[in-house]
Amino acid sequence: MLADDNGGVRYFSVRESARIQTFPDDFIFHGSWTESIRQLGNAVPVKLARTVAASIREQLQKLPG
């Protein structure tokens, strides 16, 4: 939620939440706002997933074989 200057609050939009999670702007979410926000809340941030995957790949490439 975001606090407005007047003391009110509002929820993040799906797009704002997707940007926080580093999803590309052209990524399309299907379903209601609630379903989309739930999916985003359960998602691993894209940049984090890429970083972890790159690290795993690097370690696997070091294995003999």
Image: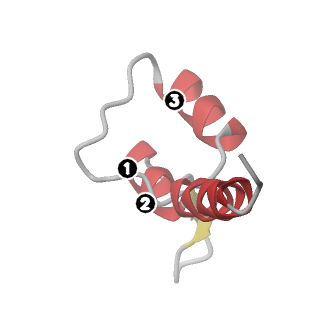
SS type, badge 3: helix
Q: Are marks 2 and 3 in contact (CB under 8 Å)?
A: no
Residue, far top: 31
Instruction: Identify the disc placed on residue 19.
Output: 2
Circle 1 SS class: helix
Query: Residue 7 occupies which quadrant of the picture?
Result: bottom right
Q: Position of residue 44 (x, y in %)?
A: 66, 47
Please name the residue shown 38% across and 19% down the image: 30
Tell me residue 12's x, y (percent): 51, 54
From this view, report whether residue 30 is shown above or below residue 28.
Answer: above
The residue indicated by pointer 3 is 36
- Marks 1,2: beta carbons within 8 A: yes
Foreground residue, 24 or 54? 54
Of 29 and 49, the residue lying toward us: 49
Label whose residue precedes the other's in the sequence (2 or 3): 2
The residue under label 3 is which amino acid type?
Answer: Ser
Q: Nearer the viewer, residue 5 or 51?
A: 51
Q: State the CA–CA distance, disc 1 to disc 2.
A: 6 Å
For badge 1, the amino acid type reads Arg
**Side (left or right) of 60 relative to 12:** right
Where 46 sits versus 4, above or below? above
Q: In the rendered view, does 54 fall on the left or right side of 59?
A: left
- Which coloring applies here? secondary structure
